[in-house]
Amino acid sequence: DGGTPQVVPNFALGMGRAALAQQLFFEIKTEYEKSLEGKEGEERENIMKELHDRNAEKCLKLAQRNGGIYNKAAQFVASLQAGAGDRSIPKPYIDALKTVCDKAPFRPFSEMEVVLKQDLGKDVKEIFREVDEQPLAAASLAQVHRAVLLDGTEVAVKIQYPGLLEQMASDFAVFRMFGQQIKPGGFDLSWIVSDFEVSLSAELDFTGEAKNGEMTAEDFAHHPYVKIPKIFWKWTTKRVLTMEYVPGLIPANDATALKKAGLDPWKVGCMISDMFAEMVFCSGRVHGDPHAGNVYAIMDPETKKERIVLVDHGLYHNVDNTLRRDFCNFVFACVSRNGNVMKTLGERFAGPLHRFFPMVLSPWFVFGSDVKLEDIRAAKQRRIPPGVDLKDIGKFLIGLHDTGGNLLGVLHSMGYIRGILNNLGFPERRRLKSFSYFASIGAARTVDQDAEGRKKMMKENKEIGSEGASFGMATLQVDALALIISILAPIAFILLLLGKRNAIGLALAIFAVLVAYIYQQFIL
């Protein structure tokens, strides 16, 4: 790999960066508390908006100043909405922080050129006919430059930031110390820091990213609409990744830009929904960082059809067969409203909080779940539900993490995709059809990632219909679920007007109001 430098953590550097973050946290917390004290109604809302706008910019500047892990955290927050809009993360924070996905502050090419020389072992002019010094994109770990090889081939060169390894090592040394000291509810959650460190370490090795990309290209070879840029191995190392240059990339979550370029947001949404459902339920290899800076759409110049371009394959979650099939069966139980299976498998995934787990996947899955009225009230008031303590939440997180393949990470990826689809105005009904169709296929599959297992999977994949194919019987349950919701929604108002005061009537009215809310928020 051309002499990738070894680093030793600089504890003082890590502490200094962490101190800046802690100082900003308390500054923002204090400003919110003082500014909102005694304020109500419209005045409170106006002040809140100003606070959001002002403090979102402060958070962005911190992420840009510290870079590395802090950019990665900002990237996570920007994509955390997962379809929930302002009810999850205030929009000003999302709008401000999303710039770090592909428009983070970039380094001068003179600094990046040093990495190229160190890792490739040659002067840049001996490899490239030309290199655009202005990067195409800049993210948390690297920036990408368009270049032309000596033979005239256009490529995109991803170059890791110099000094990043020392930054990361220093930050994690501090985070590990904090993680060992902070134990909410007496629960040791230091594994979160360890997992984050393992994940980022994997992303820092671009040869691993290149291999992952090639495997994903194989996984989706049966779908012409999926494009994974080709790797140029001769000019790829741990810190330099040279790949095919793909022009005309449009962020897949930008409906306006897609329409302007002649692409159909509905088709793009269908492709993304199907692609990632197939990843989760059929292949068991799930892209770990599918935010809007890594998922693009293009108009194929030859076929004149939409295609999805997926980049940044540094992190994948590999799910074992038992977990994957159980998850398929759980999703199908949610779609078909099979409460017994939802409870049995939900307890495996989410332990004491199993009754909430279906709604993590979709608000439509309230049917068949064991959620109580008190739980709904608590959620509305942003409180921990009655009977649930921090220890239960700790068990819930550990349970999701310790399943065979880190289901917590898979849910994180699914949340990213749901956020992209939400921005496209993609209907929940169609997203759940992707779930139902691919879960029905995946439940009957055994997938092994050795050579023979992958060969078998490639053969089975050819039987999966490409985008636009009929979903058949597997999705009729979703249509039935949609019909139930559409019927119950208007009943809510009738029940309330009737003024039922007995327990059953009141329960029906409350339930119908909940369904009406879901209908209005996620279907219309």
Image (cartoon, rainbow, N blue to C red):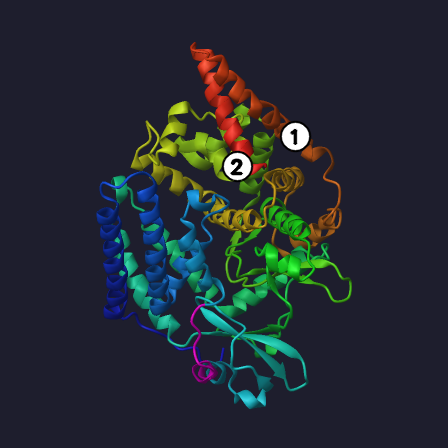
Find residue 299 and report its image quarter: bottom right
Going by the numbered disc 1, the residue's amino acid type is: Gln
Image coords of residue 253 (percent x, y): 57, 55
- Classed neighbour count for the residue bearing mark 1: other residues with Cα under 10 Å, few (<14), some (14–19), many (≥20): some
Q: Is residue 359 above or below residue 261?
A: above
Residue visible at 43% across and 64% down in the picture: 201
Q: CA distance from mark 2 to mark 1?
A: 21 Å
> Magenta segment, which residues?
104-114
Q: Is residue 117 above or below residue 47?
A: below
Magenta-span inclusion, residue 205: no
Question: On the rendered structure, is 416 left or right of 26?
Answer: right
Residue 243 visible = yes
- For disc 2, the marked residue is 521
- For disc 1, the marked residue is 477
Residue 181 visible = no
Going by the numbered disc 2, the residue's amino acid type is: Gln
Badge 2 or badge 1: first in the primary sequence: 1
